[in-house]
Image: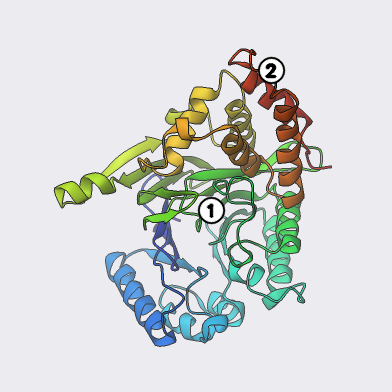
Amino acid sequence: MDAGCRFSDVSRRDSSEKSTRRQSPAVHDSISLSASRSTDHRMWVLKNLTDLLHHTFSSQFVFPVLGHEDPNPGLGQTYKEVADLWGHWLPTESLDTFSKGGYYTFEQKAKKLRIVALNTNLYVETDGKEDDPGGQWEWLRTVLDKSRKNKETVYIVGHIPPGVDERQSGVFLAPQASFQEKFNKKYVQMVRKYSDIIVGQFFGHLHSDTFRIIYGENGAPVSWLFIAPALSPRRTPSGANNPGIRLYKFDTISGQVLDYEQFYLNLVSANQRHQAEWLAEYNLTSYYGLPDVTAATLSDLAERFITQEGAPLFARYYRVNSVRQPSSSDPAGCDASCTLSHYCAITRVDYTEFHSCLEAETSAFSARAASTAAAPALLWLLLAAAAAAACRPS
């Protein structure tokens, strides 16, 4: 990707950037539209945003990804209408599959790097009767088989991530906002099968700064995915966030992600000063003390969150989870149940495994709740013990 690449998820103002050592490419989840907006208004907003990106990054590729509120057949538009807006970015082969189902792939042949842009709306908005809405599963399997044969490395980019929202205190997202269970399970199985070529998964939608680990059948970590915070602020009963944007650094030869730097906008300060000032928030590897960015390293990080020694590390994670939004980032506000929701969401992408994780660890807490004289360290020791007993992929 010598020319630089930008992935745009044009549904909300989520953003995450993806770059080579020489360029600053990106993943953007860009604009939020209310469900009450008219079809014409949605297309007007999308056109304005497309024009803005096209003029701002006139010498770079932009790889757009559909978000859940972008124009689509469920909202009265055809994929072809959206493809016509993005025709100056995507090659003919990509436009053909996008016009059919809102998904596409792009190959950088010289570096053997491939971007797979999914339409995650297909796994949320269908009536449940289809096993392969839009033919995306069969297409994805074919693309990944070809990539494996050609010894390519693959980035998967989408809007809605698989798994559970870590800020929902153990309950699932509304059906309109998460994968149907059968599709969530199929996605996990697909990543397990092709984990040897999938070197990165990038999603948005939740407005939070977090990550997920997918484990193989033997319980070993095989793949990771990053969920980037949003460019738009959001306030829900489970929390709020400052705007954030992310710059990824990756090796252009191997395709391996090396690091990222997170930037944010302090809304309180911006409103007080009537001026927006974007600041560097943290660098992934230095912030968490990571030697590299791999599934094993990130899995180890998550496991440390639930140990006594790792409590300060979880506090660091919790502060940036809401992009340092004051009302949502104080670790003192995250009790045992909150901590469990984050840990189980990160390490159990499968819905059944997520619930098993919560039940196993909650039972461990309840069994010892009467022991009020226990040392403060007991909480973290129980977390660690319960984590070991929690369900892993079988």
The C terminus sits in image quarter: top right
Q: In this figure, which residue is indicated by the disc labeled 2?
A: 371
Q: Which amino acid does label 1 sit on?
A: Phe
Question: Crowding near pointer 2: few (<14 within 10 Å), some, many (20+)?
Answer: few
Examine the rendered structure and indicate whether residue 338 appears above or below residue 126: above
Q: Quadrant of residue 215?
A: top right
Cα gap from disc 1 to disc 2, whole angstroms: 43 Å
Q: Residue at x 47, y 81 (%)?
A: 82
The N terminus sits in image quarter: bottom left
Q: In which quarter of the image is residue 135?
A: bottom right
Q: In this figure, which residue is indicated by the disc labeled 1?
A: 202
Give the residue furthest to the right. Answer: 394
On the image, the x and y values in percent for residue 250 come to: 47, 44
On the image, the x and y values in percent for residue 151 come to: 67, 53
Q: Which residue is drawn at 43% across and 30% down?
A: 287
Q: Provide the secondary structure element on which disc 1 rests.
A: strand
Res. 19 in view: no
- Earlier in the chain: of badge 1 and badge 2, it is 1
Q: Provide the secondary structure element on which disc 2 rests.
A: loop
* Left or right: where 131 falls relative to 301: right
